[in-house]
Every structure is written in C-alpha cells, then in structure tokens.
Amino acid sequence: MSDLDVKREDGPTGGRYFVTIDGHTAEMTYSKAGATRLIIDHTGVPDALRGKGAGQAMVLRAVEDARAAGIKIIPLCPFAKAQIGKHPEWQDVLA
C-alpha cells in the first residue's frame, strides 16, 4: 500500500515508528502493555509531510508488525484510531 520506508525502533517498554522524507521526520510512538498488547499513544507529522501518507504508512506498518507477532493494538492516539477505523481489513489487530 505504501512505498515509504517506515523504520522501527523497539525497546523493552516501548518504541517508535518513523519515516523521514526530504529531511523531515514523522513519528508514531508506542508503549508495551505486557507481551501481547501495543499501545499507540502519539503520532506526529510535521506540516511539511502532511498529505504525503507518512502517518497512514506508520499505522499500516504497526498493523503488519502486530499481525506477524500475534499481538493486539490499543490505539489511544486519535489519528491511529481513526486510520484503523477507516480500514476494516486492519481491525483484526484491535485489542
């Protein structure tokens, strides 16, 4: 769906997804709730990247990673919650 190069930094209690385009970085942060839940808590997209699909690409990557790991997502971030709500095919990962 997206050809953006979304990267992930993962730590013991949380991490972030991010994408850099033309020197501007968008990020989506998350925390871990045990071994089976990922809480997306914030998405930040600079004005220079608005409308380029960076936010949607990060949510998609989180959905794909959750499926691969067999975990569920709790989208506390309004943007992530809205994106998952717009894509019925992503809702299998909702906690």
Image: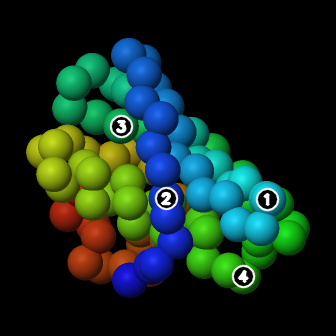
Q: Earlier in the sequence, mark 3 or mark 1?
A: 1
Mark nearest the camera among 4 and 3 is 4
Q: Which percent across, then down, holds residue 69?
A: 16, 43
Question: Do the numbered discs 1 and 2 sit on residues whose CB atoms are within 8 Å?
Answer: no
The answer to whether marks 3 and 1 mark residues whose Cβ atoms lie closer than 8 Å is no
Q: Which is in the foreground here, disc 2 or disc 4?
A: 2
Name the amino acid, label 4. Answer: Gly
The tag earlier along the polypeptide, 4 or 1, is 1
Asked if disc 2 and disc 4 are in contact, CB closer than 8 Å, the reply is no
Q: Nearer the viewer, residue 23 or 18?
A: 23
Return the residue at label 4: 51
Q: Residue at x 67, y 58 (%)?
A: 20
- Residue 38, numbered label: 3
The residue that appears at 27% across and 21% down in the rendered structure is 34
Which comes sooner in the sequence, label 1 or label 2? 2
The percent position of residue 84, horizontal first and vertical second, equals 41, 68
Could you classify mark 2 by the number of other residues whose Cα lies within 10 Å: few (under 14), some (14-19), or many (20 or more)? Answer: many
Question: Which residue does the numbered mark 1 point to in the structure image?
Answer: 24
User: Residue 33: image x %, image y %?
Assistant: 34, 25
Task: Say which label, 2 or 4, has the lower sequence index.
Answer: 2
